[in-house]
Every structure is written in C-alpha cells, then in structure tokens.
Amino acid sequence: MSSLTDRASRTSIVIVGGTVHTPEGPREVDVQIAGGVITAVGNDRAPEDARTVDARGMYVLPGAIDVHVHSRDPGFPQKEDFGTLTAAAAAGGVTTVVDMPNTVPAVDAAGVMESKAALARRQARVDVGLWALLRSGTTSEDLEGLAAAGAIGFKAYLGYAFSLTRKQVHYSPDLDDPDLEAPPDYGTLARLAPVIAELGLPLLIHAEDPGILAAFRRPLETYADLLAARPAEAEAVAVAAAAEIAGASGVRLHVAHLSSAAGLAAAQEAIRAGAPLTLETCPQYLWLCDDDFRRLGNAMKVYPPIRTASDRDALLEGLAKGVIGMVATDHAPHTDEEKAAPFGEAPSGSPGVQTLYVSCLELAKRQGDVWRAPRWVSEAPAALAGLQESKGTIAPGFDADIVIVDPNKATRVRADVMRSRQRHGALDGMEFGFSVRATYLRGSLVSGEGRRAERPSGRIVRPFRR
C-alpha cells in the first residue's frame, strides 16, 4: 500500500483491487478520490497522476460513525481527551465520533457547545459531532440555541440528576443536595419533544426509569447486586414511556445502549404501534454476559449493565432481524486506578471505539452476511446523526472516509495496542477475524502503514436538518 503525504486530500487517489461495499452491495471496483471526496466508483480510467493504493484481497468499507462516545474533555482529560479518543478511533476505522454532552461543564447551552467544539477542533484526528444535554430545566430557547450551534441532537439521562453549580451530570436520581436539579422525566420529554421535532433533530435517551432505579438502589458488593439495582424493567418502562411521547409528538426517538430482552420487547411493541423509534446496542452487550465478570472484573462494569446470556441472545436476534439498526460503543474510559477500586466504588464505563468495526464484522460474519456490519456502523449512524448527505456511503460526492480491512488477518484485543488512555476494556482478550489495515479521512491517511494519527485533521460536523 503506497504512502500518502499530507497533501493527500488535494491529490487524486485511486484504491484498486478491493471488494467495495457500495449501495448496490459488494463489488470489485476501483474507488477514485480527489479533493477529499469520492469522484468515481467503478472501473473508469483513473487520472495518470493519481496515487494508487493496492487493496487486492481487502475489503474497502465506509468509515464508521460511532454515535456514542465520551471524550471526557473538558472536565476529565486524565481519563481521555479528544486527541486520544480520536487516535483510537482512527486506528479502528472510525472516521467520525459523536460525543456525549456529560463533560464538565455539561453541554446545555450554545456557548458551552461552541467552546467544546473549539477544543475538539484543536485535537481531533477524525471528525467530531456533539450531542447536547436535555435537562429538566431546559427551555425551548435553549434547544433552539444549541441547534443553531450545531448540535447533532439532544440527550436525556432519565435516571440522573444535575449539579447546578458544578454544571455536571450526577449519576444518581437522588436529590440529597439542594444544588441538585431533578433528572429529566417523562413530563420534560413531553414538554420539549415537539420543539425538538420542529428543529428536525433526534431525541436520544439513556433509558433507565428513575423511579425504578430509586426503588431498587442498594450497596454494590457483587455483580448480582448490580443486576438487581438496575433491572431490565427500568429499561423497558423508560423505552415504552418515551416511545409514547415520540408517537404523539413526532420526534425521532433514539434509544442508546439497549441492553435487555425486556427493553427490546418494549421497543418492538412501540415500533409496531408506529412510534418513530431507532435502536442502538453496543458490542459489549452482544459479546458478553454476566458470567464473564469472573474473567473481566471491573473492566465490564458499565451502565446499563451487561446482563444474562438470554438478554444477549435476544439482542443478537434483534440485530439479525433489523429491529436494532445500529451498533455504537458507549466508549467511556476511566483511569486504571479508578477501575482498580473495589467493585462498588469503581466507575462504570469501558473503552471500545478502537474495536467497533472488527467486532461488528465478526458478528456479521457469524450471522451469515459480513456486509451487514457497514450498515450497522456507517449507514444507519449517518442517518441518525443527519450526516447521510456526506458520510456513511462509498459513492460519488461523499466524503472519502474509507477503511481498508484485511479479512484474513485477525485482531486480538490487547492493552498494548489500544490508543485510549484506558487500555483494558470489556472486550479484553477477544479475537476477531479481521484487522483494520488503513483508515482515510477525506482521502488523507490517518492510520495505517505503521502510521498513527499524529496531526489534528478532524472537523466539527453539523447535521443536515430535516
């Protein structure tokens, strides 16, 4: 594979010999790139001065769009920042990340979003979009300002209060401090969903019912305690209630990190009733179950929790049938010291952006159609994020965000090759039968050939407003 210079985005490139994922299906065609965009997909004659990238025996795929990541910056750069997050993304074939709003200060106002975008722009190795926070105190004017500032959509943490002085999401529904604002509830969603629908943006929910979480709260000494404290019913109730509001208001509702058979069943019922609802799950819920805690320990402590084998099997079936349309990571790193704390004190979260593509390719292969994976991690996320006009597809006119994958070389998940600040994650030790050979962002090589993404070249992306 030829080396590309930093002028690659302005130079003609042709990727030859690979099997390309196109809107018509996999095809053995060439991909021509100029000016950072795809100019031709086929066997047309390339310009004589074009740089040739040899992809014989490889898959040529659209760059992944991970719509659920946590940069931790501003607020906690010792856990992660946009530089380390996007370096890990590039290494894994993820060319766009959409960052959650629970940084500090939380992204609940246009000015905060603009400051965070400026920070990301200085560090990002791949493109970045930003979710905005929906609080119980959010107003329609807040939503309009955030939309104008470029918000991809709005995230409501149904089970979490908010610290007004620290401008920080409080990871509990408890209101034991006068500084805490109550979590957004279904009344908040009903009040603001029509405004979000009018803005043409999606409403994203962390689907755990705060009343159920409060009723089942207990000390966490064992993994069984965690499952009891955050039962699947909390997810199912939240999905059903939010879907009712979506059906009445017309807002596009997206359920993040679906984790349970009960939550999936509630979503299926809502979809049958006509609710405008999309579903996302994560690799950790598709590969693991509670039995894996003996092997992984705190590395697999995430919220909502990784549940039983029957929950995992239900999610796999939902993905195979297309009820669950996309896979994102909930990439949420912490320091190694934090994750080494006793179980009840260790924070929830795991890195995952670097293994998104290879883990999904392996899942799709096992389901009998490896070409489903780009639909889960590229096409469907592009539509959710309003980026479907420029990303998620290998076709003329689209950004040349392209990943070259070797289908005959396995990837073993090892701490020493992870680029995130937290090196040990929920998928530690697993092996997937694919490897990312090169990642291109608008035609520039950002990872591959022994090269790491070193120079910030990412942009802030804004949604196409419907």
Image (cartoon, grey):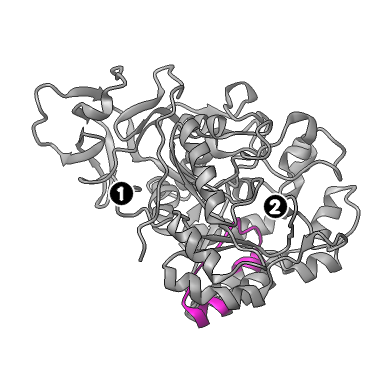
Residue 48's quadrant in the figure? Answer: top left
User: Which residue does the numbered mark 2 point to in the structure image?
Assistant: 167
Label ID, residue 435: none
Decide if residue 320 is in sight here.
Answer: no
Q: Which residues are magenta?
A: 245-264
Residue found 27% across the figure and 32% down from its top: 18
Write down the quadrant of residue 446 in the picture. top left
- Magenta-colored stretch includes residue 256: yes
Sequence-wise first label, 2 or 1: 2
Q: Amino acid at mark 2?
A: Lys
- For the residue pair 223 and 181, the one nearer the viewer reads as 181
Residue 348's spot in the image, x, y percent? 74, 45
Circle 1: element type: loop
The amino acid sitting under disc 1 is: Ser
Q: Check disc 1 and report the residue beneath it.
A: 390
**Front: mark 2 or 1:** 2
Dot 1, how many residues are within 10 Å of its Cα: few (below 14), some (14-19), or many (20+)?
Answer: some
Rendered residue at 63%/76% (across/down): 241
- Answer whether residue 95 is visible to the viewer in this image: yes
Q: Is residue 8 magenta?
A: no
Residue beneath the point at 52% across and 41% down: 356
- Using the numbered discs, state the Cα–Cα distance from disc 2 to disc 1 in whole angstroms: 34 Å
